[in-house]
Amino acid sequence: EETKSWKKLINVAVSGAAGMISNHLLFKLASGEVFGPDQPIALKLLGSERSFEALEGVAMELEDSLYPLLREVSIGIDPYDVFKGVEWALLIGAKPRGPGMERAALLDVNGQIFAEQGKALNAVASRNVKVLVVGNPCNTNALICMKNAPNIPPKNFHALTRLDENRAKCQLALKAGVFYDKVSNVTIWGNHSTTQVPDFLNAKIGGVPAKEVIKDNHWLENEFTQKVQTRGGALIKKWGRSSAASTAVSIVDAIRSLVTPTPKGDWFSTGVYTTGNPYGIAEDIVFSMPCRSEGNGDYELVEDVIFDDYLRARIKKSEDELLAEKKCVAHLTGEGNAYCD
Ligand code: LMR
């Protein structure tokens, strides 16, 4: 034990820490499966006044688990306290949607939360904090958060679309009759909403273009696409609440993709700031795109992807939706009066 060399402690903030997603996620973070078995971690849990006792309960369970890597658990309801010095901020806490709602219906209530948290991050977090926004509508919330944190690089803000990527991989694997690990190069383009575009043009199955393996364009353009786009809503109907365990798993995947080198030839999807993108997507929104990482917490956009008319048209729809969402939260990004369609 004494000879084991530990890395420097990292500070990870999690908002919505008393919620369902966090209840899965926090124990994964503490176990070392996210940041690695030699990475000590401090968990800073942000909750609300309403959920404060539940938050205390979460901290008790974490402490009782005796994780060797978990060096500190602290709780609070003020983001200016909780975000102090954090290197990662996993922003989960928000009002979730219920049955029959679209995620965009949450724009106003949740947008306020992310404006405030962006300000707090800007004031007290590490200057290179990585921010992953999970609360919906996550792309626009990430944009709001970023705009309220001008001293943090825009590149550091992510919106979670990894759950959609995982859902797409699952459907492609089932259709092709192969195990999930054969499916690679899957991009989710755009918004984490029903306009998202699961890209089957660039996807591969066993290293071969998915279209050549599946040979059913009708299924790909219709059933597959729709199934992935509406999976979150379908799950809410079944459970009466939004997905929690699979969301936590996809958060783990999203972080691991940034802290470990991307396997050769593959990539992952994450919602990131579009300014300077090579695909011709509108600038100044948060859009899911294909990325690679060297494992240092940063990413670069993948250049060698192909487009056809179908893919372009679908991407445009998601882009239009995000531009409309952005107009609707202009009061929260400091860009004038809000205009909602
Ligand atoms: C999901 O995709 O399951 C989550 O974003 C929850 C939702 O509103 O669908």
Image (cartoon, helix red, strand yellow):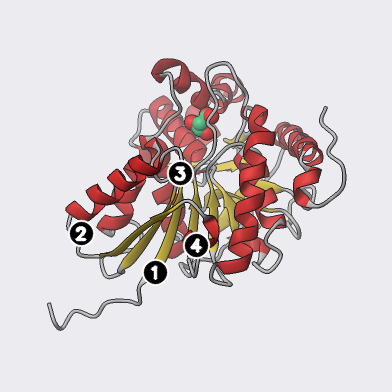
Residue 67 numbered mark, or none: 2
Q: Check disc 2 and report its element: helix, strand or loop.
A: loop
Which quadrant would residue 146 be assigned to in this image? Answer: bottom right
Dot 4 amino acid type: Asp
Residue 169 numbered mark, or none: none
Residue at 50%, 67% in the rendered image: 84
Q: Is mark 3 within 8 Å of ligand 1?
A: no
Foreground disc of the pair 2, 4? 4
Dot 2 amino acid type: Tyr
Q: Check disc 4 and report its element: helix, strand or loop.
A: helix
Residue at 67%, 61% in the rendered image: 149
Crowd band around label 2 with a 10 angstrom C-alpha radius: few (<14), some (14–19), many (20+): some
Residue 317 in the image: x percent, y percent? 75, 32
Q: Earlier in the sequence, mark 3 or mark 2?
A: 3
Mark 2 to mark 4 CA distance (whole Å): 24 Å
Residue 16 numbered mark, or none: 3
Residue 16 in the image: x percent, y percent? 45, 44
Dot 3 amino acid type: Gly
Q: Are marks 3 and 4 in contact (CB under 8 Å)?
A: no
Q: What residue is pinned by disc 4?
A: 81
Crowd band around label 4 with a 10 angstrom C-alpha radius: few (<14), some (14–19), many (20+): some
Mark 1 to mark 3 CA distance (whole Å): 19 Å
Q: Earlier in the sequence, mark 1 or mark 2?
A: 1
